[in-house]
Amino acid sequence: CSGNRRQYLTHKLRKTNCKTVGQNDQDQSGIYEIQSLPHPRSETYSSFFVDSRVVSNPHLHLVTPMDPLYFLLPYFENEEKWQPWNQIVEAKAIPSEVINRIDMAQLKHLFLVNDSYGDDMILYKFKKEQGLDWLKKKMIR
Protein backbone atom coordinates (compact mmCIF):
# COMPACT_ATOMS: atom_id res chain seq x y z
CA CYS A 1 0.00 0.00 0.00
CA SER A 2 1.57 3.28 -1.02
CA GLY A 3 1.46 6.42 1.09
CA ASN A 4 -1.13 6.77 3.85
CA ARG A 5 -4.01 5.40 1.80
CA ARG A 6 -5.78 2.41 3.32
CA GLN A 7 -6.28 -0.66 1.22
CA TYR A 8 -9.48 -2.65 1.66
CA LEU A 9 -9.43 -6.26 0.55
CA THR A 10 -12.52 -8.38 0.38
CA HIS A 11 -12.48 -12.12 0.61
CA LYS A 12 -15.27 -14.64 0.26
CA LEU A 13 -14.74 -17.30 2.92
CA ARG A 14 -14.89 -20.94 1.88
CA LYS A 15 -16.15 -23.68 4.13
CA THR A 16 -13.24 -25.84 5.27
CA ASN A 17 -12.43 -28.17 8.12
CA CYS A 18 -10.03 -25.58 9.55
CA LYS A 19 -11.00 -23.15 12.24
CA THR A 20 -10.93 -19.72 10.58
CA VAL A 21 -11.87 -16.20 11.44
CA GLY A 22 -15.35 -15.48 10.15
CA GLN A 23 -16.99 -18.88 10.38
CA ASN A 24 -20.36 -17.45 11.35
CA ASP A 25 -22.35 -14.89 9.36
CA GLN A 26 -21.75 -12.11 11.89
CA ASP A 27 -17.94 -12.33 11.57
CA GLN A 28 -18.01 -12.37 7.75
CA SER A 29 -19.11 -8.75 7.63
CA GLY A 30 -16.30 -7.48 9.84
CA ILE A 31 -13.16 -5.51 9.20
CA TYR A 32 -9.89 -7.15 10.20
CA GLU A 33 -6.34 -5.92 10.53
CA ILE A 34 -3.78 -8.43 9.23
CA GLN A 35 -0.22 -8.26 10.50
CA SER A 36 2.62 -10.41 9.23
CA LEU A 37 5.36 -10.91 11.81
CA PRO A 38 8.68 -12.47 10.76
CA HIS A 39 10.29 -14.98 13.08
CA PRO A 40 12.90 -13.11 15.16
CA ARG A 41 15.69 -15.66 14.66
CA SER A 42 15.54 -16.86 11.09
CA GLU A 43 13.76 -15.95 7.86
CA THR A 44 14.62 -19.33 6.31
CA TYR A 45 13.86 -21.93 8.97
CA SER A 46 11.25 -21.35 11.61
CA SER A 47 8.12 -22.85 13.10
CA PHE A 48 5.25 -21.72 15.28
CA PHE A 49 2.90 -23.66 17.53
CA VAL A 50 -0.75 -23.09 16.57
CA ASP A 51 -3.07 -24.94 18.96
CA SER A 52 -1.66 -28.49 18.93
CA ARG A 53 0.01 -28.19 15.50
CA VAL A 54 3.45 -27.05 14.43
CA VAL A 55 3.37 -24.71 11.45
CA SER A 56 6.58 -24.33 9.44
CA ASN A 57 6.52 -20.86 8.04
CA PRO A 58 8.87 -17.90 8.46
CA HIS A 59 5.94 -15.54 9.06
CA LEU A 60 3.20 -15.52 11.63
CA HIS A 61 0.00 -13.83 10.47
CA LEU A 62 -2.17 -12.24 13.15
CA VAL A 63 -5.76 -11.33 12.35
CA THR A 64 -7.45 -8.85 14.67
CA PRO A 65 -11.07 -7.71 14.37
CA MET A 66 -11.43 -3.92 14.09
CA ASP A 67 -14.39 -1.80 15.08
CA PRO A 68 -15.54 0.00 11.89
CA LEU A 69 -16.14 3.18 13.92
CA TYR A 70 -12.37 3.66 14.15
CA PHE A 71 -12.32 4.28 10.41
CA LEU A 72 -14.89 7.09 10.74
CA LEU A 73 -12.81 9.21 13.12
CA PRO A 74 -10.47 10.79 10.50
CA TYR A 75 -13.50 12.15 8.64
CA PHE A 76 -14.76 14.09 11.66
CA GLU A 77 -12.23 16.43 13.23
CA ASN A 78 -14.70 19.14 14.23
CA GLU A 79 -18.30 19.12 15.30
CA GLU A 80 -20.61 19.20 12.34
CA LYS A 81 -24.16 20.38 11.74
CA TRP A 82 -27.22 18.14 12.04
CA GLN A 83 -27.59 16.02 8.88
CA PRO A 84 -29.17 12.76 7.70
CA TRP A 85 -26.68 9.89 7.63
CA ASN A 86 -26.75 9.47 3.83
CA GLN A 87 -25.80 13.14 3.36
CA ILE A 88 -22.90 12.77 5.78
CA VAL A 89 -21.61 9.70 3.93
CA GLU A 90 -21.84 11.41 0.53
CA ALA A 91 -20.30 14.71 1.67
CA LYS A 92 -17.36 13.02 3.42
CA ALA A 93 -16.86 10.35 0.70
CA ILE A 94 -16.54 7.59 3.30
CA PRO A 95 -15.65 4.25 1.61
CA SER A 96 -18.51 1.79 1.20
CA GLU A 97 -16.29 -0.97 2.68
CA VAL A 98 -16.56 0.88 6.00
CA ILE A 99 -20.16 2.10 5.74
CA ASN A 100 -21.53 -1.35 4.89
CA ARG A 101 -20.07 -2.80 8.08
CA ILE A 102 -21.35 -0.23 10.55
CA ASP A 103 -24.32 -1.10 12.70
CA MET A 104 -26.46 2.05 12.83
CA ALA A 105 -26.98 1.50 16.57
CA GLN A 106 -23.21 1.99 17.04
CA LEU A 107 -23.35 5.57 15.74
CA LYS A 108 -24.57 6.75 19.15
CA HIS A 109 -20.98 6.31 20.37
CA LEU A 110 -19.76 9.15 18.11
CA PHE A 111 -22.87 11.13 17.20
CA LEU A 112 -25.81 12.83 18.84
CA VAL A 113 -28.96 11.37 17.29
CA ASN A 114 -32.15 13.36 16.77
CA ASP A 115 -35.29 11.48 15.75
CA SER A 116 -37.79 14.19 16.71
CA TYR A 117 -38.88 14.50 13.06
CA GLY A 118 -39.91 10.85 12.86
CA ASP A 119 -38.26 7.59 11.85
CA ASP A 120 -37.84 8.69 8.23
CA MET A 121 -35.81 11.81 9.17
CA ILE A 122 -33.12 10.82 11.69
CA LEU A 123 -30.39 13.44 12.03
CA TYR A 124 -26.82 12.95 13.24
CA LYS A 125 -24.24 15.38 14.62
CA PHE A 126 -20.66 14.43 15.41
CA LYS A 127 -19.71 15.19 19.02
CA LYS A 128 -15.97 15.24 19.73
CA GLU A 129 -16.32 14.67 23.50
CA GLN A 130 -18.59 11.71 22.88
CA GLY A 131 -16.01 10.20 20.52
CA LEU A 132 -13.22 10.72 23.05
CA ASP A 133 -15.29 9.06 25.79
CA TRP A 134 -15.91 6.09 23.48
CA LEU A 135 -12.16 5.80 22.75
CA LYS A 136 -11.33 5.93 26.47
CA LYS A 137 -13.81 3.13 27.19
CA LYS A 138 -12.29 1.06 24.38
CA MET A 139 -8.81 1.55 25.83
CA ILE A 140 -9.90 0.60 29.36
CA ARG A 141 -11.67 -2.54 28.15
Image (spheres, rainbow, N blue to C red):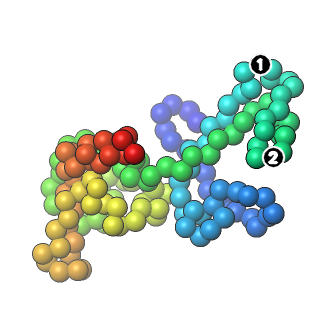
First of labels 1, 2 by sequence position: 1
Q: Is residue 89 left or right of residue 117?
A: right
Q: CA distance from mark 1 to mark 2?
A: 22 Å
Q: Is residue 95 left or right of residue 63?
A: left
Instruction: Decide: is 32 above or below 96.
Output: above
Q: Is residue 91 left or right of residue 113?
A: right
Instruction: Decide: is 136 above or below 104.
Output: above
Residue 115: x percent and y percent? 17, 73
Mark 1 or mark 2, which is nearer to you?
2
Crowding at mark 1 (Cα within 10 Å: few <14, some 14-19, many 20+):
few
Q: Secondary structure at mark 1?
A: loop
- Residue that badge 1 annotates: 41
- Residue that badge 2 annotates: 52
- In which quadrant of the rendered image does the N terminus lie? top right
Instruction: Decide: is 26 above or below 55.
Output: below
Which residue shows up at 19% across the image and 45% down it?
Answer: 129
Residue 139: x percent and y percent? 37, 40
Look at label 2 and name its amino acid. Ser
Q: Is residue 74 left or right of residue 127?
A: right
Which residue shows up at 76% across the image and 47% down it?
Answer: 51
Residue 20: x percent and y percent? 70, 57
Q: Which one is nearer the viewer's eye here, 86 or 115?
A: 115
Count the labels in the image.
2
Residue 43: x percent and y percent? 80, 23
> Is residue 83 shown to the viewer in this render?
no
Labels 1 & 2 near each other (Cβ < 8 A): no
Look at label 1 and name its amino acid. Arg
